[in-house]
Image (spheres, rainbow, N blue to C red):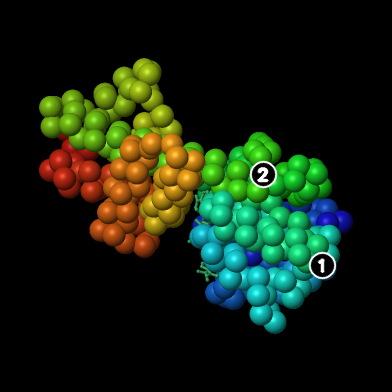
Amino acid sequence: MPTVAFLGLGAIGRPMAARLAAAPDIELAVWNRTAERARSFAAEHRARHAATPADAARGASVVITCLPVSADVEQLLDGPDGLLAGLSKGAVLVDCTSGDPTTSRRIASRLAEHGVGFLDAPVSGGTNGAEQGTLTVMVGGDPALLDRVRPVLTAFGKKIVHCGDVGAGDALKAVNNALLAVHVWSTGEGLAALEKLGVKAEVALDVINASSGRSNASMNLFPERVLTRAFPRTFRLALLDKDIGIAAGVAREQKVPAPLLQLAADLFRIAHGVLGEEADHVEAVKLVEQWAGVRIGETQ
Ligand code: NDP
């Protein structure tokens, strides 16, 4: 029975950990910075509440982290209560944070000094995908390590893909989310212009979704979240801002001109500043609407 530790019970981490807790062959320990969240998780699921990262990692063959940024994971390594104090030689740290390749490489080499493996393994599919165990997991690092932890990752992942060396999963995830950001923003601009012209948003989306401009934004996010004005808070705008910044950084490092990614990064940085830390990513559309002087869906 693999012993697994999960650190970071946030919007996506909590349902991922719940899938692990429900797997009959996994022994789970959970840790969260705000201890009450881990305590309530352990009370509701078959899991042990760990008092510290070291306590969570002790005896675990697989340790999974899911925090906002890679620097948060790096900060958990050190000190008497840190991960390195609990990780055993031969264990694997699987970082499901949508992280940045440079920090992931640094974490991997620090862990290697202690005989601990590292995989960057960001996920896609949202909180619904986590609840249903249908996430896509994009993995960077030694493929033999992935083979070893794959049975654990299948608790929450349906499509688990080896992408390349350490950092490759992070880079691919950042590019994916940059595309999401571009689609959200550009769909907002297009629908705002059509709205002003008197075209109903439902009509516009009906046509676009049967045509070549469709995307996850037009097919799901706008109908479910913008037209309904529900704007559920499932994935913070602050985190998408971080992701596009990583994607633009990857393009810069690779000396690829990427003016569109940089522009999207700037727009989402502005939206994050205006709308705040708790706003959902789709709420960026509210800024497009404000600039346009129109509300998408107001034409009846
Ligand atoms: P949340 O903001 O909902 O949760 C963040 C979690 O990290 C909380 O458990 C929080 O603890 C903990 N945390 C924050 N800062 C620190 C720190 N310095 N040290 C230790 N723990 C910390 O984020 P999400 O769960 O939404 O996202 C987590 C990662 O997954 C991000 O990289 C995000 O980009 C990615 N992701 C999110 C998706 C989503 O739909 N939400 C989809 C795909 C990827 P506390 O409870 O104490 O605040």
For numbered disc 1, what is the local secondary structure?
A: loop
Locate residue 149 relative to residue 272 in the image: left or right: right
Q: Residue lying furthest bottom in this view?
A: 80
Q: Which residue is mark 2?
A: 165
The mark tally for this picture is 2
Assess disc 1: are there few (<14), some (14-19) or many (≥20) residues with their C-alpha within 10 Å of its C-alpha: some
Q: Quadrant of residue 193?
A: top left
Foreground disc of the pair 1, 2: 2
Query: As shown in the figure, which amino acid type bears the numbered disc 1?
Result: Ser
For numbered disc 2, what is the local secondary structure?
A: loop
Q: Quadrant of residue 300?
A: top left
Residue 140 visible? The answer is yes
| Above/below status of 53 relative to 272 | below
Query: As shown in the figure, which amino acid type bears the numbered disc 2?
Result: Asp
Residue that appears at 72% across and 63% down: 111
Locate residue 166 relative to residue 258 in the image: left or right: right
| Above/below status of 79 relative to 166 | below
Decide if ligand 1 comes within 8 Å of the CB at mark 2. Answer: no
Between the C-alphas of marks 1 and 2, the distance is 23 Å
Q: Earlier in the sequence, mark 1 or mark 2?
A: 1
Where, quadrant-wise, is the N terminus in this rendering? Answer: bottom right
- Where in the figure is residue 71, as x and y percent of width and height? 54, 64
Q: Residue lying furthest right in this view?
A: 1
Residue 177, label in figure: none
Q: Quadrant of residue 179?
A: top left
Residue 88, label in figure: 1
| Above/below status of 23 relative to 107 | above
